[in-house]
Image (cartoon, rainbow, N blue to C red):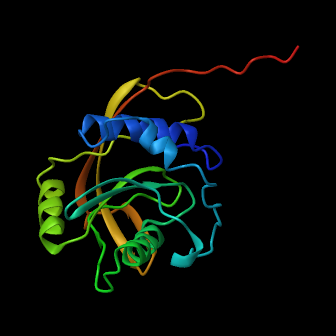
């Protein structure tokens, strides 16, 4: 769910909708209540360390946790902070958070992770079998034509540590993105 780095209201609304669809949220106030404190400030080109941030847990089930990822924070830094936060709150020093998906640094939304190897295997299998999908809302400049369509490309992910990059390559895995223009905005004259 893409949005500007200074707005969390849209992200929270989309997260509430997604969690309600998954049956993990019975009251929309749960997400708003978890955001009573200030969101972490985006710090481009600087790694966020675990002690620097509070992770907002949106839902938790045995072996699975859903968190709010804000723009400007890498998935890797967020999961490191989540692991530290869960260790402190549970007292379980050996607790691990296992990444099963990722969102780009500038993307916000719901990020699901596993807290057990069994859950990680199950979630990974769901992603592999295309039983899980990611839905994004993006703000684009200019006109997108046609208004609906599909982009197919082979995406290759390279990198190390938290410096991952995806690019189109014949060595990559097939990726398909369906898109639909939801609205057009016009600039109002200030006259």
Q: Residue 104: horizontal and vertical position, in percent?
A: 45, 59
112 on left or right of 146 = left
Q: Residue 73: horizontal and vertical position, in percent?
A: 53, 63
Q: Residue at x 14, y 47 (%)?
A: 131
Q: Residue at x 55, y 21 (%)?
A: 184
145 on left or right of 92 = right
- Give the image quarter of residue 4: top right
* Of 104 and 78, the residue lying toward us: 78
| Residue extending farthest top | 191
| Residue extending farthest right | 191
Quadrant for the N terminus in the image: top left
Q: Is residue 15 visible?
A: yes
Label total for image: 0
* Of 86 and 127, the residue lying toward us: 86
* Of 122 and 129, the residue lying toward us: 122
24 on left or right of 33 = left
């Amino acid at each position: 769910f893409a949005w500007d780095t200074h707005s969390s209201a849209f992200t929270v609304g989309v997260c509430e909708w997604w969690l309600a669809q998954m049956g993990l949220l019975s009251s929309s106030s749960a997400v708003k209540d978890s955001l009573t404190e200030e969101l972490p400030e985006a710090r481009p080109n600087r790694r966020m360390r675990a002690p620097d941030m509070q992770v907002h847990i949106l839902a938790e089930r045995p072996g699975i946790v859903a968190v709010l990822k804000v723009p400007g924070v890498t998935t890797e830094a967020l999961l490191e902070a989540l692991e530290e936060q869960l260790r402190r709150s549970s007292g379980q020093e050996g607790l691990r958070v296992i990444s099963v998906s990722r969102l780009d640094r500038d993307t916000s939304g719901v990020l699901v992770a596993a807290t057990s190897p069994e859950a990680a295997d199950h979630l990974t299998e769901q992603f592999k079998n295309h039983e899980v999908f990611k839905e994004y809302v993006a703000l684009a400049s200019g006109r997108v034509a046609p208004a609906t369509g599909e982009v197919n490309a082979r995406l290759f992910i390279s990198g190390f540590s938290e410096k991952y990059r995806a690019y189109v390559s014949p060595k990559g895995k097939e990726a398909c993105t369906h898109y639909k223009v939801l609205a057009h905005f016009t600039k109002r004259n200030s006259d």
